[in-house]
Amino acid sequence: MRALWPETEPLLDQIEDAEQLTFARYCHRTLRRPVETALVHLGDSWHSTSPQLGQGANMALLDAAALSQSLSGAYDLPEALSNYAALRSPHVRLYQALSRVFTPFYQSESRLLPLLRDYLVSIASRVPPAPYVLAALVAGSAGSPLRRLGLRNAESLPFSPRETKEPSHDGHYS
Ligand SMILES: Cc1cc2nc3c(=O)[nH]c(=O)nc-3n(C[C@H](O)[C@H](O)[C@H](O)COP(=O)(O)OP(=O)(O)OC[C@H]3O[C@@H](n4cnc5c(N)ncnc54)[C@H](O)[C@@H]3O)c2cc1C
């Protein structure tokens, strides 16, 4: 770690004992409805999940966009909050379910499941349309969350192979 990221040195210097470390624990927890009296949940406070699909930040941003859109477009507050929940619930439920299914393959003590995962994914990732399905899963676009928010054009960008740009030699995208 020190060799790879020298800036962490002041933090690493403070660790003398394994007891000082806290190990990450994952759990799935989703509220059935994100709206309570005088309280709206978004992001992790509505739906926290294990990190297999890397969608926590995306989901929080989508919730924020949906809430903002709902607040500006509705007749009154109850309608706005109801729209917010309706806009985001299907995508939230889909990713909660997918992440739960993937958890034993990525985060369990099992030796068999990770082997099975590596074997199956290495085969499946070469057979269309699996590469596109897998890319959509890890990009968070399964379930068309952007289309629900009226952002259809943005949704097509990351997955069109013809539109994918290669980085230049210095690693930047033009
Ligand atoms: C180690 C780790 C790695 C992760 N890696 C990824 C990843 O690779 N990709 C990904 O998409 N997601 C990742 N996540 C998940 C992602 O960070 C969260 O899903 C995302 O930050 C949720 O955003 P949020 O706004 O809902 O909550 P948060 O980002 O937790 O923001 C909540 C904010 O509220 C503040 N707050 C709390 N209580 C109060 C209070 N009483 N008053 C005022 N402020 C308060 C907190 O300080 C915090 O700033 C990771 C999470 C962890 C812990």
Image: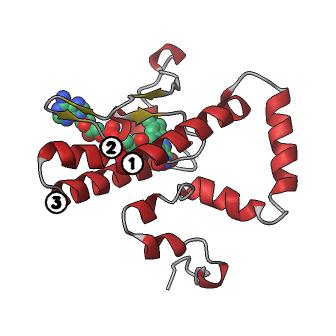
**x, y percentage for residue 167?**
58, 80
Task: Say the numbered circle drawn on residue 88.
Answer: 1
Q: In the rendered picture of this protein, how many numbered marks are placed on residues?
A: 3
Measured Cα–Cα span from mark 3 to mark 2: 15 Å
Q: Give coordinates of residue 107: x percent, y percent.
A: 66, 29
Q: Which mark is residue 72?
A: 3
- Residue 131 image point, x, y percent: 74, 63
Contact (Cβ within 8 Å) of mark 1 with mark 2: yes
**Position of 55 relative to 44 (above/below):** below
Q: Which comes sooner in the sequence, label 1 or label 3?
A: 3
Residue 60 visible (yes or no): no
Seen at 28% across and 49% down, the residue is 83
Query: Image quadrant of residue 164?
Result: bottom right
Type of residue at label 3? Ser
Q: Is disc 1's CB within 8 Å of ligand 1?
A: no
Note whether 74 is above or below 89 in the view shown: below
Location of ligand 1 given as a quarter of the image = top left
Q: Amino acid at mark 2?
A: Ala
Q: Is mark 3 within 8 Å of ligand 1?
A: no
For disc 2, the marked residue is: 85
